[in-house]
Amino acid sequence: MRWSQAFIPTLRQDPADADAASHRLLVRGGFIRQLMSGSYSLLPLGRRVAAKVERIIREEMGSIGGQEFLLPVVHPGEVWRRSGRWDSVDEIMVKFRDRRGVDLLLAVTHEEIFALLAAELSSYRQLPQLWYHLQTKFRDEPRPKAGLLRVREFTMKDSYSFDLDAAGLDRQFANHFAAYTRIFRRTGLEPIAVQASSGVMGGSESVEFMVPSEAGEDFVAVCRGCGYAANLERATSTPASVEDTLWEGPPERFPTPGVRTIAALEAFGDFAAAGRQIKTMAYVVDGRLTLVLLRGDHEVVEQKLIDGLGTQDIRPGHPDEIGEALGALPGSLGAVGVTGLPVIADPSLRGRGNMVTGANRDDWHLRGVTVDRDIAVDRWLDVRRVEPGEGCPGCGEPLEVFKAIEVGHIFKLGTKYSEAMGARVLDEEGRERPIVMGSYGIGVGRQMAAVVEAHHDEAGIVWPVSVAPFEAVVTPVGSDDATTIAAEGIYRGLLERGVEAILDDREERPGVKFADAELVGIPYRVTVGPRRLAQGEVEVVRRRGRETQTAPPAAAAAVVAAAVAAER
RNA sequence: CGGGCUGUAGCGCAGCUUGGCAGCGCACCUGCUUUGGGAGCAGGGGGUCGCCGGUUCGAAUCCGGCCAGCCCGACCA
């Protein structure tokens, strides 16, 4: 490829709407352009990177027995009605009708259709199967952001495993874990595997691959001691305990005019320290007002409520419905004496005494509350957000909490979709059994962005050779015949050696060419200039670290080819 | 959905308060010079000022409505 004829629209300035490093650099480097919120066109450079990521994914899926499919991106609504997801994933799904008035949708994922195809399996002898494809998904996310990190339209590698039993699923799950680890390592990422919430998909084991990054959207808790790692949506810990002072007798009401927050209540004295308050939150769960209690200095994780209660239908209560049920507004709520409403309490409240909570009367609170005696807890459920420094549930060491990008997710589906779609086989004894499924996803674009987040510097992207749009650039500086001939020769030599090379034959000043090569992030650059050429040398510069070596023009291609081969 | 902000040339922005020829830098085209880290000089092309409506002799500017995008939160397979 000759740079002068390539469409590589680099920008000198950062785009105004880009914040994350990957967003900024992928736009500036001419890899992507935004079409609308959450939708990006891949330009030639971006497509080349994506193709390399996809090739690595295909190789590793092949290594664990994956067979590649390509399923449609427009599905009939009827199929999604059979799984129940026509309604349950309503919000992010784009639905429309064809000319005959048939309900259609843009695929947000492909469990249903793969399961439908799996209905053609009929014998345990045909199992296990591992099917996958790389296909567009469209999810009408409420808030796309950060370039390719969170988009509405994206390419995903999703694979689905089909087994007779849980043991088979375990093997496929382990195979995916290993394959994903190799995929990420080959693309220059070092993710941490964390326990995750299964979300609405259902299923038991769920592991996310997380790359630590400030641009991430998830928080994970990790223990350096024993290796415990979990998404904050699921992580547990042992919080610092609070010493209760003695209080005899029943709870006592005391006036707290204008007090609506934990912080304001703390001003009343040590007995009302945040850790000695009971925070009372009112949620509407499956249409029913439900109280959720935590320690005053703890935060609720709604995903834990969703997982623990087994429903997705959860929202904070509106002030009017709360007032009607409890006689007070948020800020003065409490569960003492409440009957008729489900009360869920975090285990950190177990056995606590002499606590402070709302009196269900505006401007009044209660003190001297003994949880076990005064509150009718229907269910103890860990709903508390883990905070940095709290004890690891495994070994007690302090937990670290950091932001991360979810680059992959694997989980065990079970039989939900096989049952809905009639994917059953006969086992050895001739009994009909639903196929046990697993589901495994990697976002191609998000992985590209994650690589950039992990590999860039002030000048631009520093692609690992494995996914770089080009492996080497030949940069002639000067337009004299000797320079041009030498540069062309090295360029041809690279191509002959199988190196993906681009010749920067533009009539630009050296500074422009160097800056573009570094912005775009090409791992190796051969600089050919009259000055060094007169001494019988050209320069080979490695993008990472800008390490420079010299070589005779005749040897340069071989030097680069060897270096590139070592890093592929 | 709540809060904040922004829409003016391909990109980055000024102009808007106080209505009166639509500007600047980069990029682009032509010529000359220059050539190892984003060149200089000269000339030139490029605009539904997000859209619709209103006020006004006159609207990028004032008023109303709408649309789009970004950030924080909520939400998120």
Image (cartoon, coloured by chain):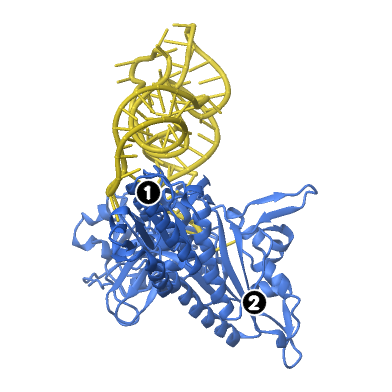
Chain colours: A blue, B yellow
The chain under label 2 reads A
Residue type at the position of mark 2? Thr
- Image point (67%, 64%), residue name: A84
Residue type at the position of mark 1? Asp
Residue A415 tag number = 2
Depth check: A539 or A37 in front? A539
Q: Secondary structure at mark 1?
A: loop
In the displayed orientation, state which residue is furthest to the bottom: A429
Q: Residues within 10 Å of mark 2 (few under 14, many from 20)?
A: many
The chain under label 1 reads A
Depth check: A442 or A548 in front? A548
Labels 1 and 2 within one chain: yes
Residue A443 in sight: no
Q: Are marks 1 and 2 in contact (CB under 8 Å)?
A: no
Depth check: A355 or A230 in front? A230
Q: Which residue is mark 1?
A: A480
Residue A174 placed where, x, y %?
52, 82
Quadrant showing the C terminus of chain A = bottom left
- Image point (35%, 48%), residue name: A478
Residue A269 placed where, x, y %?
19, 58
First-in-chain label (1 vs 2): 2
Q: Secondary structure at mark 2?
A: loop
Q: In the picture provided, is A518 more to the left or to the right than A198?
A: left
